[in-house]
Amino acid sequence: MPHQSSNTAEVVTLSLGVASMVPASMDQAFEDIVDLADQALYQAKEAGRNRIGLHGLAPVTSRAA
């Protein structure tokens, strides 16, 4: 798609931050997934135009000894 008013690119570009996680609790899920997606977006932006940043976390578990 042409982007004639841009000083940096002739076409529209898109950078995405994508995150996934398996939350240990529902209290953790919302704030953490938004934070991870934000971190991924900034990674994508730092890498250049038309990039996707990915971030993910494994579930947090604890074991009783």
Image (cartoon, grey):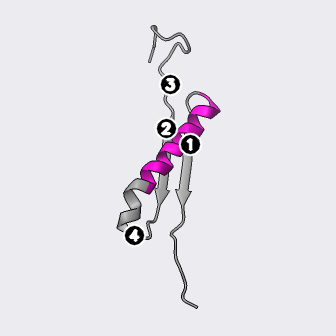
**In this view, the mark in front (3 or 4):** 4
Label 2 environment density (alpha carbons within 10 Å; few <14, some 14–19, many ≥20) = some
Q: Which residue is drawn at 54% across and 56% down?
A: 56
- Residue 28, given in percent of the width and then of the height, sits at 41, 63
**In this view, the mark in front (1 or 3):** 1
Judging depth in this view, the residue of 64 and 49 nearest the camera is: 64
* Residue highlighted by disc 4: 25
The answer to whether 7 is drawn above or below residue 19 in the figure is above
Residue 18 painted magenta:
no
> Residues under labels 4 and 1: Cα distance?
25 Å
Q: Residue at x 58, y 91 (%)?
A: 65
Q: Main secondary structure of the magenta part?
A: helix
Contact between marks 1 and 3 (CB within 8 A): the answer is no
- Residue 62, given in percent of the width and then of the height, sits at 53, 80
Query: Mark 3 belongs to which amino acid?
Result: Thr
| SS at badge 1 | strand
* Residue highlighted by disc 3: 13
> Residues under labels 1 and 2: Cα distance?
6 Å
Contact between marks 2 and 4 (CB within 8 A): the answer is no
* Residue highlighted by disc 1: 53
> Residues under labels 2 and 4: Cα distance?
26 Å
* Residue highlighted by disc 2: 16
Query: Mark 2 belongs to which amino acid?
Result: Leu
The magenta stretch spans which residues?
A: 32-48
Query: Mark 1 belongs to which amino acid?
Result: Gly
